[in-house]
Image: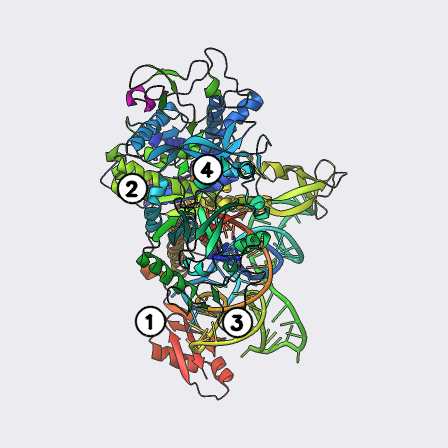
RNA sequence: GCGGACGUGAUGGAAUGGUAGACAUAUCGGACUUAAAAUCCGAAGGCCUUGUGCCGUGUGGGUUCGAGUCCCACCGUCCGCACCA
């Protein structure tokens, strides 16, 4: 009998699938469509276990849908623009394009042996001009519709690399790559008008029933809706009023100062004649923007000398301060300070000797605030002091609502709903990204490039010489000729925009492009109309906000520009966020007691401890952490596939842990998975060759188990319960191995087992399907259906509880009525003994489940 | 600080409010073998007074005939957001 040889089997069946083109998706009205998508990868050059887990999950869904009669679209591509390519260019002197395309080729070679049911005929790479020219075309459409615009904005600027950095690229106030102190600099940048969609993006979250609640909540918080009021404060010097935004106008009685942002127009005006203030503003510019730094940063301010009138008590005058803690891009850039009910304002007030006055007390505790601001939960009742809105003892929330109405009624303020969500700055001073297709003309200003001139393609050399990436700054800026062009409007010599787009733009519409990846327009509305939406999207939780929010915005913007049908404005019907693959870290200590990390393959067990293979030195084991090259706790999928085969890797990453949680990769676990698949191979091969006679009782028992397994595994596969489905398959394999059933029943069971396993272990399943003499491919065979009649045994075992504690069991026919079950239970010896003469008060019979006798 | 999730054997984890610990790992025992590997069979939450016993799903309360599951409080861990007025 042949042994299980994964290498042989897997190559053979992958070739068979390719030849039959079973994964090629074509539009068809015969079957319901199903679009399953895993978040596409960045082509770093190596696949990792996280990829294996992600694509295997998608593959299980895709293959199951294929077997249940769906027309499945399961495409694959590359999120290919990005900083890493430019870093490689700097470090290794290789052109970003060459590096990226080589990585794509390498990763493809590592991906293929996994046997994922991707339709490779739809492969796309975002760095290819055939992709980004459509992105440029859409940019122009967005521009026309006012969905993208240019404005001055304060950004993180790395003075050494001479580029804008995203917030997450600023670590402890320093550029993550250069280590230079990041400055806040005002630049003219392109922005997508995502803030116009704040309410809609928030509202529509409610309809995303098949998204994790966690992701919806994160987006809700990110959008950050708040209801408040804008109140103008009249200036005593007769200048135009300063308008403050507040969500707590109920605390107005305690207002003791107004604070404005250093970037507020009033601050800027004053700074022109006030060197001290000008210096203060310059200093705040340089301030760190990181959370930790902001937390520690001192609240500082400067008195402007201006005073304003209290809007409710005109006799009260409030000083206006410039505060380094006031944000210009939220609200109006001006706030009133109420030290009694805001800790930050209190700290500020104490520092600069400003008044502290309560607006309310807690019921029965009439004490003035001293060192701790009084901020009870909004649902708690407080006692408002001589309140202008005519309220006394109500909850803070009621106080807020009443006050907003009061101000609005009196015409003293305007109710305002604000969102934290800000417009999406897409300009990057980078080479390896999609060029922004506009031209700067001295006479016409900023002019969109003509569509027929697209793509605006990246230059691949400097007029014959390789582009110099080592010099900091954007190579596009210093390219000798690339910028030169004719103004699309007047024809005069003009200069191209050298900023490129944030790579999140590339990934905000690729799912739509997959529906017609070779179309001459960004999308083909017939194809998009047929395939959209993505029925199941799968990826990491790390994209919960950025990518998934940007894509929701993009789908709306694309719809406005006629690139997507209306039904696709929420592009992902169902979302699943999978956990990571983790691994223990093996480390030793150097002479300075610093950790030295070791790869798992350099470590082995000896005498009950883990030791370095080379020296025998014992290693410390640090509990499981996300696989990371720097900690060396990585396992290369390529090695695993070589050693055990793809099916083993696939089986293992799905077993053991629920898919939304992290799974720890262990050598023992991988080996166990391999042993199990070998066992299935052996058992099924034996069955294929067996001719033992029928055994009525054992045959029925086996087939009953088979139908239960069909039911459970199908349920597991359809609800992301892959680990539970696999547990059922283990159990059924054990049942099959021990069964005394005849060859015919065993063959039927084996065929079903192989089929149920096929989404997880498609190669092994194809092999055994053929061993069992089945026609065609298991991949395209119809998924088995459970026979309801076989799911319940003729007699069932019911536990009997007395006062909720299990005391006995009875065997009863499955359809015995309640009264008879009760009678049977009460006449059971163990029950009689346990009752010890006591009279049951009540007997609860849950048919088919349990009996509870209450005494 | 605000918001959220999760706490079950040695370990990963099962369990529509209905027999807690399925399935797997590690462990132990047995069979086969000259031996090993492979394979097969079996044991295994804790406690004692070994009983058809008691206790047991982070802690304490509650709802229920019945709670790992629902509710409240606390403890712990993890995640997201945060000078957002």
Give the side of residue A406 with respect to residue A42, left or right. left
Q: Is residue A212 visible?
A: no
> Of residues A41 and A326, which is closer to you in this image?
A326
Separation of residues labelled 1 and 3 (CA atoms): 67 Å
Q: Chain under label 3? A: A
Residue named by callout 3? A365
The residue shown at (34%, 60%) is A406
Residue named by callout 4? A269
Please report whichever mark, 1 or 3, sits nearer to the chain's N-terminal start: 3
Give the side of residue A620 with respect to residue A680, left or right. right
Please report whichever mark, 2 or 1, sits nearer to the chain's N-terminal start: 2
Say how the picture is coloured: rainbow
> Of residues A788 and A377, which is closer to you in this image?
A377
- Quadrant in the picture for residue A187: top left
> Of residues A80 and A827, which is closer to you in this image?
A80
Separation of residues labelled 1 and 4 (CA atoms): 87 Å
Q: Chain under label 2? A: A
Q: Nearer the viewer, mark 2 or mark 4?
A: 4
Please report whichever mark, 3 or 2, sits nearer to the chain's N-terminal start: 3
Residue named by callout 2? A568
SS of the residue under disc 4 = helix
- Judge whether A582 appears above or below A278 on screen: below
């Amino acid at each position: 009998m042949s042994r299980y040889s994964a290498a042989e089997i897997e190559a053979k069946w992958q070739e068979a699938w390719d030849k039959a083109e079973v994964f090629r998706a074509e539009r068809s009205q015969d079957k319901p469509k199903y679009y399953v998508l895993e978040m596409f990868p960045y082509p770093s050059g190596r696949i990792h276990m996280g990829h294996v887990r992600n694509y295997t999950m998608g593959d299980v869904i895709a293959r199951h849908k294929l077997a249940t009669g769906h027309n499945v679209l399961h495409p694959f591509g590359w999120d290919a623009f990005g900083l890493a390519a430019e870093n490689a260019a700097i470090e290794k002197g290789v052109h970003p394009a060459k590096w990226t395309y080589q990585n794509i080729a390498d990763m493809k070679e590592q991906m293929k042996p996994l046997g994922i049911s991707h339709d490779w005929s739809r492969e796309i790479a975002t760095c290819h001009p055939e992709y980004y020219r459509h992105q440029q075309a859409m940019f122009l459409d967005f521009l026309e519709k006012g969905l993208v615009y240019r404005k001055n904005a304060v950004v993180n600027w790395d003075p050494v690399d001479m580029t804008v950095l995203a917030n997450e690229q600023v670590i402890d106030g320093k550029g993550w790559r250069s280590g230079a102190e990041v400055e806040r600099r005002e630049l003219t940048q392109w922005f997508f008008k995502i803030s116009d969609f704040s309410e809609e993006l928030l509202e529509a979250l409610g309809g995303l029933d098949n998204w994790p609640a966690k992701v919806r909540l994160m987006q809700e918080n990110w959008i950050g809706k708040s209801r408040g009021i804008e109140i103008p404060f009249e200036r005593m010097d007769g200048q135009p009023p300063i308008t403050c935004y507040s969500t707590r106008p109920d605390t107005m009685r305690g207002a003791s100062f107004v604070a404005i942002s250093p970037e507020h127009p009033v601050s800027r005006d004053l700074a022109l004649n006030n060197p001290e203030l000008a210096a203060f503003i310059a200093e705040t510019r340089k301030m760190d923007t990181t959370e930790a730094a902001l937390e520690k940063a001192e609240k500082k301010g400067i008195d402007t000398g201006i005073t304003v009138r209290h809007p409710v008590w005109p006799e009260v005058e409030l000083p206006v301060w410039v505060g380094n803690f006031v944000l210009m891009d939220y609200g109006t850039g001006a706030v009133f300070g109420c030290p009694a009910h805001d800790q930050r304002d209190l700290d500020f007030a104490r520092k600069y000797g400003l008044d502290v006055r309560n607006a309310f007390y807690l019921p029965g505790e009439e004490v003035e605030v001293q060192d701790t601001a009084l901020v009870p939960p909004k649902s708690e009742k407080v006692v408002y002091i001589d309140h202008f809105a005519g309220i006394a003892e109500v909850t803070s929330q009621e106080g807020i609502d009443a006050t907003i109405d009061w101000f609005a009624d009196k015409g003293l303020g305007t109710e305002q709903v604000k969102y934290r969500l800000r417009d999406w700055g897409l300009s990057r001073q980078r080479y390896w990204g999609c060029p922004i297709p506009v031209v700067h003309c001295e006479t016409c200003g900023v002019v969109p490039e003509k569509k027929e001139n697209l793509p605006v393609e990246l230059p691949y050399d400097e007029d014959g010489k390789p582009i110099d990436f080592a010099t900091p700054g954007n190579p596009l800026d210093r390219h000798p000729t690339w910028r030169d062009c004719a103004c699309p409007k007047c024809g005069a010599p003009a200069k191209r925009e050298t900023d490129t787009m944030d790579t999140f733009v590339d990934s905000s519409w690729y799912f739509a492009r997959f529906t017609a990846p070779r179309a001459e327009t960004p999308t083909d509305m017939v194809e998009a109309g047929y395939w959209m939406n993505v029925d199941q999207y799968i990826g990491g939780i790390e994209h919960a906000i950025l990518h998934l929010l940007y894509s929701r915005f993009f789908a709306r913007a694309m719809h406005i520009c006629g690139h997507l049908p209306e039904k696709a404005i929420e592009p992902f019907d169902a979302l699943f966020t999978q956990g990571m693959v983790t691994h223990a870290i093996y480390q030793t200590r150097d002479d300075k007691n610093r950790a030295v990390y070791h790869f798992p393959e350099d470590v082995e067990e000896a005498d009950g401890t883990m030791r370095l293979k080379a020296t025998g030195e014992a290693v410390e084991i640090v509990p499981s952490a996300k696989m990371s090259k720097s900690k060396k706790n990585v396992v290369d999928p390529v090695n695993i596939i070589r050693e055990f085969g793809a099916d083993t890797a696939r089986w293992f990453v799905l077993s053991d842990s629920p898919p939304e949680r992290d799974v720890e990769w262990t050598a023992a676990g991988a080996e166990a998975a391999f042993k199990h698949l070998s066992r299935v191979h052996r058992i099924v091969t034996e069955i294929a060759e067996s001719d033992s006679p029928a055994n009525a009782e054992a045959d029925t028992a086996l087939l009953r188990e088979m139908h239960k397994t069909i039911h459970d595994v199908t349920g597991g596969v359809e609800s992301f319960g892959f680990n539970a489905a696999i547990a059922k398959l283990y159990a059924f394999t054990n049942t099959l191995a021990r069964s005394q059933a005849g060859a015919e029943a065993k063959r039927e069971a084996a065929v079903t087992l192989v089929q149920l396993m096929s989404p997880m272990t498609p190669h092994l399943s194809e092999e055994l399907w053929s061993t069992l003499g089945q026609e065609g491919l298991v991949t395209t065979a119809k998924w088995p259906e459970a026979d309801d009649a076989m799911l319940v045994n003729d007699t069932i075992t019911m536990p009997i509880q007395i006062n909720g504690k299990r005391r006995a069991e009875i065997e009863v026919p499955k359809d015995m009525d309640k009264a008879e079950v009760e009678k049977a239970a009460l006449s059971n010896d163990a029950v009689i003994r346990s009752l010890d003469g006591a009279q049951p008060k009540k007997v609860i019979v849950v048919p088919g489940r349990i009996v509870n006798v209450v005494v």
